[in-house]
Image (tube, helix red, strand yellow):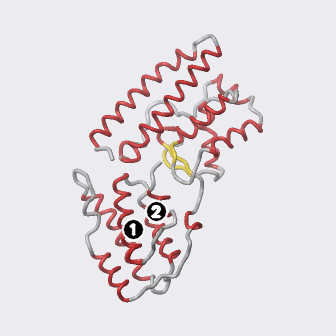
């Protein structure tokens, strides 16, 4: 974990680096020799993609408020006239190949669009297919619109959006019957009424603790009310899923502590594994 002050300083440094790299773009585009120009473009895009996906993205995942809905500059999906000419010449087979490459780098957890589009652009360049990065970003939006990808954030700005493959982790739950006796019910009641997330870090985590505790208490109420008539692991994981969806946008520390509380509930119910459900919603990049 990175302390907030350090993370904020790093974030600003990476923002300055990206702005500085942006100043090089028009100079690179003016390089007369095509081979040299493409080599510089490829090298620069690799650096930008690494800064966005490997350096800045982890900071935003840990401190979600670093990201905002208002982004400076034109959309990353905007094509210049000469880029549009290139795109207009693409065949349906070539567009399909672009989509296949984009999808091949997507998984069941969130990944930055900057990473997905950037890696696709690099691979296409290696295959001698000249495609603007902005068009790769456009195709990500198209894949989301067609239901082949799920998204969060602003898809017009690749550094501020994420995508993943559509997938229901409940499908991988290995269901089993649970033993629900008086002891289990007493422990569930004790969980419901005890203080939660007491070790949540931060300068003043009171509001975050209350918000997450409210979700946990609501979950506990649901389990208490329904577990005796639905004593199965799959039913419990279904209730967990509804709560996990509500905390996906919390910062890393909040999600980690929330997951620890869910593991306590699993221990009470005798559930040894969530079969990937917790990792799907609480995992990082």
Q: Is residue 200 above or below residue 135?
A: below
Q: Is residue 97 above or below residue 248?
A: above
Q: Secondary structure at mark 2?
A: helix
Left or right of 57 on screen, residue 34: right
Q: Is residue 15 above or below residue 67?
A: above
Q: How many marks?
A: 2
**Quadrant in which residue 118 is drawn:** top right
Residue 210 rendering spot, x and y as whole percentages: 28, 63
Q: Secondary structure at mark 1?
A: helix
* Label at residue 250: none
Pointers 1 and 2 in contact (CB under 8 A)? yes
The residue furthest top is: 32
**Quadrant in which residue 60 is drawn:** top left
- Give the residue pinned by disc 1: 262
Q: Is residue 188 above or below residue 32?
A: below
* Label at residue 278: 2
Residue 145 rendering spot, x and y as whole percentages: 63, 49
Residue 34 or 79: which is nearer the viewer? 34
Left or right of 192 on screen, residue 248: right
The residue furthest left is: 203
Q: Residue at x 57, y 51 (%)?
A: 107
Residue 174 rendering spot, x and y as whole percentages: 56, 72
Residue 118 or 219: which is nearer the viewer? 118
* Distance Cα–Cα, label 1 vs label 2: 9 Å
């Amino acid at each position: 974990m990175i302390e907030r002050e350090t993370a904020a300083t790093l974030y600003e440094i990476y923002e300055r680096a990206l702005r500085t790299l942006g100043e090089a773009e028009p100079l690179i585009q003016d390089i007369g020799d095509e081979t040299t120009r493409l080599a510089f473009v490829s090298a620069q895009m690799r650096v930008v993609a690494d800064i966005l996906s490997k350096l800045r993205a982890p900071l935003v995942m840990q401190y979600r408020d670093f990201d905002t809905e208002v982004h400076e500059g034109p959309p990353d999906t905007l094509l210049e006239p000469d880029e549009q000419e290139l795109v207009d010449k693409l065949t349906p087979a070539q567009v399909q190949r672009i989509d296949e490459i984009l999808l091949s780098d997507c998984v069941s957890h969130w990944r930055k669009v900057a990473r997905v589009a950037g890696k696709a652009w690099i691979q296409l360049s290696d295959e001698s297919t000249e495609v603007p990065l902005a068009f790769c970003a456009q195709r990500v939006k198209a894949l989301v619109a067609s239901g082949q990808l799920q998204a969060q954030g602003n898809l017009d700005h690749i550094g501020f959006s994420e995508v993943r493959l559509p997938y229901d982790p409940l499908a991988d739950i290995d269901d089993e019957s649970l033993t629900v006796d008086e002891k289990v019910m007493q422990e569930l009641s004790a969980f419901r009424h005890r203080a939660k997330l007491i070790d949540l870090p931060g300068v003043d985590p009171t509001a975050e603790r209350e918000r997450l505790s409210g979700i946990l208490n609501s979950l506990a109420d649901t389990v208490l009310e329904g577990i005796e008539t639905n004593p199965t692991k799959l039913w419990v994981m279904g209730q967990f899923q509804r709560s996990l969806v509500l905390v996906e946008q919390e910062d890393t520390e909040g999600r980690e502590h929330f997951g620890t509380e869910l593991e306590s509930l699993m221990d009470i119910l005798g559930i040894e594994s969530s079969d990937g459900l917790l990792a799907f919603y609480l995992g990082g990049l």
